[in-house]
Image: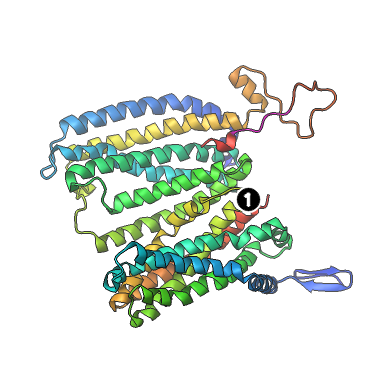
Amino acid sequence: MRPENGETSVGDIQTRQSLAGAAMAVMQRDLRLALRRSGDTLQPLGFFVVVTTLFPLALDPQLSLLRDIAPAALWVGALLSSLLALDLLFREDAQDGTLEQLALCGVPFAGLLVAKTAVHWLMTGLPLVLVAPLAATALGAPIAAVPGIIAALLLGTVALSLIGAVGAGLTMGMKRNGSLLALLVLPLVAPVLIFGARATALAIAGESVAAPLYLLGAMAVLAATLTPWAVAAAVRIGLE
Amino acid sequence: MAWVWFHRFGSPPHFYRLAKRLTPWFGWSALLLCVAGLIGGLVLAPPDFRQGDGFRIIYVHAPDAWLSEMVYVTMAVSAAVGLIWRMNVGHAVAAGCATIGASFTVVALATGMLWGRPMWGTYWEWDPRLTSELLLLFLYLGYMGLRSGFDDVGRADRASAVLAIVGVVNVPIIHYSVVWWNSLHQAASVMKLGRPNMPASMLVPLLMMLAGFMCYFFTLLLIRARGEILLRERTAHWIAAVLGTAPEDPPEYGGPSPEHPASRGPLPPSSLAHRV
């Protein structure tokens, strides 16, 4: 039977290549691998907790004072631990050749990379969002602030993962990149930090977080729309 | 046929000759415009009623700031041209822009700090313009760092082109985020020398300085782009006619063949990728 509509026939076997199917397969593989090496996902989380602990140590540990710097401490900690985790996004798959196979398999590469980034966010960004209320409470935030903090960090970590994926793709091909990834990504995510910290501060003060949350949502949507092209271009360059 | 002029720019020898011819024009225009602007701004313009003579640093600070943003856009556009149309000339121009833009940004920050001392009483303020300039400097440094991290020039070109395009989309977002953030947190100590409020005697020298700086940027860019093209095309035969020397041999990937003497080995790894 002649193959049609993106189907290929290998001998008697016909396989349908669809983006959804390939993306699901990639996500399942990445989830399985990430759950096997849970240390990789727990370490950035531990880093986040340690960093937010350093702030009270460096300051006067009065909760009323810590409450003022809690948004800053939470978001700087989230940014830095996301940067740490981003290094893992493509490195292993680039080294063992999986990324090249994904690039060559005929399915839109950007879609597969978005699937990988989504799993990466699930394993690193989402745990951060779930642990952040604990850290926030430790820094003096009231319990009523928790929904606002979670919402802001949800949107913010999605934008961080997507924009960071561009940086990870660009630095993937370099042998020693040191802190180049941080230097590349941090200026690009500065708006996310600004609005995210603002949302957290408003939540802690008990006021409405709608305005910065809308802007954070807009940034997350913009990142989801534009970064797939950039990530695919960056990873293709890194795979040369 | 309408696009022939565009693709002709992509030819390194054509671009090289054009750049060489245009450089003196831009250079002399830059000199004349800057001298006229400085005389107009430093000598002829009246002192500002609030800041006295201290406002005159705007004739250096404002063009630097505008240029630093314009150079970033130029870098991104030429990098995009190089990426999409696969023109080495585009990448060469983008590579030349990077250090020039970073220098303009540093001078803008420094002159801003010098302006801040008499006006605000402190060298540094988290003013929206200074903060966005600082973030722009980090973008330039990241671009230069990425470029120098690759050994292969082609990969460095393409990777930094992607970064420049992502950055240029982000620059307006960063700028307006910082303005919004600053309007929330800052007591109103922003300098109020907006252009619509300036009388002609102050505005005209400022525009002349801006035009002079732009010509200066094009002069520097054309010189640097010519240097980049010379480096990238150093094994091409048209270089010999330009430089009056014998063309370099292309690198021999498989090692020296029996016909060539063993002393003529392959080219040493180019240090191109480390030039910014």
Residue sticking out furthest to the top: B244
Residue sticking out furthest to the bottom: A144
Q: Which residue corresponds to mark 1?
A: A173
Looking at the magenta stretch, what is its main secondary structure? loop
Amino acid type assigned to the residue bearing label 1 in the image: Gly
Determine whether the residue tagged by mark 1 lies in a helix, strand or loop.
loop
Label 1 resides on the chain identified as A
Measured from the top left, where is residue B84 in percent x and y? 59, 48
A161 or A220: which is nearer to us?
A161
Segment colored magenta: B266-271
**A84 above or below B30?**
below
A80 or B209: which is nearer to us?
A80
Q: Is residue B20 left or right of residue A120?
A: left
**A134 above or below B187?**
below
Which residue lies at the image location 40% right of the left edge and 44% below the top edge? Answer: B70
Residue B198 visible within the image: no
